[in-house]
Amino acid sequence: MQNKSPQNIEVELRGLMSEEKYHQIIIFLSKKASHITNDSKISYFFVVPKGILKISNQSINNTAKISYKDGNVSKNILMEYEIPISPDDTEKGISMFKSLGFKNVNEVRQNRINFKYKRAEIAIKITPDFGPHFEIEMMARDKADAVKKRMRIQILCNELGLEPLTRRQMDKLVHSINKKHGFLN
């Protein structure tokens, strides 16, 4: 049965940024944001035909979860499903997905700070493959609400001087990362 609860459509824009912009935006949001948390974690991304399947272990918060975002990542509007698990079960989850045929897994360590700003969740991150980057997301009730939220996120990006990746840029980046890690022929 598909999860039909309200607010489970994630609308997200992400983009790369320079080291200088990374530090500037952290300083700005540290002063202006209403909620700030350190959310550094290790995520295990599995290559799936569409969407994103991952297990995240946030040892800093002693939490972990299995997440599946259904859809084309470059379109920025995905149905999101999350199941909390014990951090002790992370390795069992990885083994289970591998036994189901998801052999390609990319372990990604990320330094991440989350901010709540103007009703949006803003994550400022550094990962080995993306380098310094941002994700701005809002949850939507339905597709019409998702389109409105995407426009609001774009306005917020403009206000903050952040340039989101286009669909084409995102597809190309994800493809190059998968190729780099040997997940594509």
Image (tube, rainbow, N blue to C red):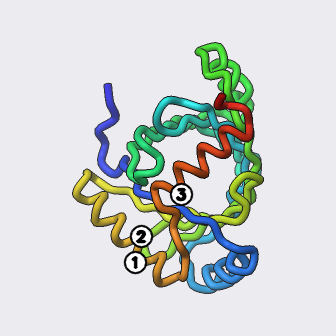
Residue 13 point in image, percent of width and height: 48, 62
Residue flagged by tag 2: what amino acid is it?
A: Ile
Residue at disc 3, secondary structure = helix
Secondary element at tag 2: helix
Q: Residue furthest left?
A: 144
Q: Is residue 80 above or below residue 152?
A: above
Amino acid at dot 1: Ile
Badge 2: how crowded within 10 Å, few (<14), some, or many (20+)? many
Q: Judge by depth and name the residue closer to the eye, 20 or 178.
A: 178
- Lower position in the chain sequence, tag 2 or tag 3: 2
Where residue 169 is drawn, which disc sits there? 3
Amino acid at the residue labelled 3: Gln
Q: Which residue in the protein does label 2 denote? A: 153
> Which residue is more in the foreground, 103 or 96?
103
Q: Do tag 3 and tag 1 residues touch (Cβ < 8 Å)?
A: no
Image point 46% across, 34% down: which residue?
50
